[in-house]
Image (spheres, rainbow, N blue to C red):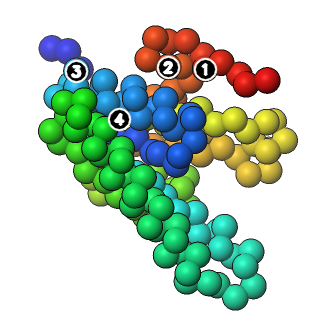
Amino acid sequence: MLQQYERIMVAVDGSKEAELAFKKAVNVAKRNDAELLLVHIIDTRAFQTVAAFDSVLAEQATELANKSLKEYTDTATKEGLTKVSSVVDYGSPKAIIAKQLPKEKNVDLIMLGATGLNAVERLFIGSVSEYVIRNAPCDVLIVRTDLDNHLPKEKS
């Protein structure tokens, strides 16, 4: 019997890398007749640099995330998917994507865009994808290429 995924989670954050992962996740979900779970994690550590936590910033981030997820949901539905859901969560993207959501939502495949961090950035902050690969309880697919399996063209 062929491996069939039932619940595919893709993390989207508005980056080009996440867009590639989303497009491939839609195709994988269609081939597997799987549910597609769209996830956007608002990194609350970004707000810790603001001396007095401003709830307006959090509300704006949430509004943008919900708007973006609605657009992704609409696109997935237009592509023929019938089982699409979304989650906006708050905290550490690494932990939520790698551990919390896969357990809560019974995810069997996580798809992520490859990050553009350089070696120094990875050393100090680490990449989400690296953490997810090491800690997720399910399969993880890191997307680097477009639907034709070509690397995206660099803008000069």
Number of residues whose C-alpha sits closer than 10 Å to that of mark 2, classed few (under 14), some (14–19) or many (20 or more): some
Q: Amino acid at mark 3?
A: Arg
Earlier-in-chain disc, 4 versus 1: 4
Relative to 146, 123 lies left or right = right
Residue pointed to by mark 1: 152
Q: Are marks 2 and 1 in contact (CB under 8 Å)?
A: yes
**Residue at which label 4 appears:** 109
Q: Secondary structure at mark 1?
A: loop
The residue under label 2 is which amino acid type?
Asp
Query: CA separation, marks 4 and 1?
Result: 23 Å
Q: Secondary structure at mark 4?
A: strand
What is the C-alpha distance between the residues marked 3 and 4? 13 Å
Specify the quadrant that holds the N terminus: top left
Query: What residue sits right under mark 2 in the picture?
Result: 146
Identified at 30% across, 57% down, the residue is 104
Which x, y percent locates residue 97?
Answer: 46, 51
Q: CA distance from mark 1 to mark 3?
A: 24 Å
| Placement of 8 over or under 42, stated as above or below | above
Mark 1: which amino acid? Pro
Task: Report, in whole angstroms, how far the alpha carbon at label 2 lies from the one at label 1.
Answer: 7 Å
Disc 3 versus disc 2: nearer the observer: 2
